[in-house]
Image (spheres, rainbow, N blue to C red):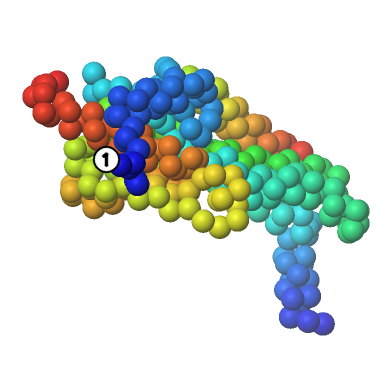
Amino acid sequence: MTPFDAFIQFLAGFIPQFSIWWVVKGLFVLGLALYLAFAAIVIRQVGLMSKTLAGEFNVPLKLISWVHFLVAVAVFLLVLVIL
Amino acid sequence: MPDIFVAKPEKPKEILKKELDEILTQGSRFFAAFVPRPKNLRFETQQKKEKIVLLLRRHPITNLPWILLAIFLIFAPFLIKGFISLDFIPGNYQLILFLCWYLLTFAFVFERFLTWFFNVNILTDERVIDINFPTLLYREITEAKIDKIQDVNIKTGGYVRSLFNFGDVLIQTAGAIPEICFEAVPDPEQVSRIINQLLYEEEQERLERRVR
């Protein structure tokens, strides 16, 4: 038995219903939380860029950045619900 | 006695000005890399009477590498599925993995597009401005007055640049920033001519002692 197998067995003994997918879910939640922060920064960035160069394309770009943020929120909630 | 050599008269500045005016009145699409006299566009440090003469971005062909990469990223999940069986991953995890992949792909495309779209070079009747967004939430605005320009150099070369007629325009100034570089802009010769015309007009203004 490798040390890794022993560690997994130890965890399985420690937590009766341990599953590797819990770890994967945790990673998804952590990754998406970071992604949400990034999506929020993108909104700020588009705002800053639009302020620097104001033109007719700024409204659609701001809209895209907001839709992107909302989709990221939806995926984050989906992870919490279905995983 | 016949003349051996007769020098061609130089193009009067007024004719040059007319030619440039024709170029500058050509269709101005905001969503382009060479936009003469853009409509409905303002930049943050623009003064009240200041007019934008030319807006420049990097040539669209410079976007080709990331566009190709984006196309690959769009089709990558299907390619991976073709080679590797993902049956060991539960269906709901596969769905989330798929969604996360496309979120990241979209973020990559959007970021690259924003970088191209907002990294601009602006020529006004008063100044030369270089706006850069090197990273997230960080911006660099470099500017020089037209009358501080000392020299304009063009740097082209290479297969792609020659084929698509784009290159760098290096503007040496007598200001605090010794050089402003317009990177990979379309038609650098035309850009240089427009800068020279602006310089000439500025000189004329100074001679006529016009005060704005």
Q: How many marks?
A: 1
Residue on which disc 1 sits:
B143
At label 1, the amino acid type is Glu
Would residue A26 appear left or right of B182 to someone viewing this image?
Answer: right
Residue at the spot 71% in from the left edge and 36% down from the top edge: A78
Horizontal and vertical percent position of residue B205: 16, 26
Residue with the most extreme left position: B209
Considering only vertical position in the picture, is B143 above or below B177?
Answer: above
Q: Work out whether residue B73 or residue B183 is closer to the camera in this orientation and state it.
A: B183
**Is residue A6 positioned above or below A45 on the image?**
below
Q: Name the side, left or right, on which B179 lies relative to A22.
A: left
| Relative horizontal placement of residue B28, taking residue B48 as reference (left or right) | right
Which of the two residues, B211 or B80, is positioned nearer the viewer here? B211
Q: Residue at x 64, y 50 (%)?
A: B65
| Residue at horizontal 45 percent and vertical 26 percent from the top | B23
Mark 1 belongs to chain: B
**Mark 1: few/some/many CA within 10 Å (<14, 14-19, 20+):** many
Mark 1 lies on a secondary structure that is strand
> Which residue lies most toward the front here?
B1
Please determine whether, in this image, residue B154 is positioned above or below residue B41. below
Can you give x and y, in whole percent of width and height, for residue B78 in the image? 85, 48
Query: Is residue A41 at all visible to an observer of this figure?
Result: no
Please tell me which residue lies in front, B77 or B70: B70
User: In which quadrant will I find the N terminus of chain B?
Assistant: top left
| Residue under the image location 68 percent in, 50 percent down | B69
Image coordinates of residue B105 in percent, x first then y, are 67, 44
Quarter of the image for the C terminus of chain B: give it: top left
**Foreground pick, B114 / B49:** B49
Residue B160, position as x, y percentages in the image: 60, 52
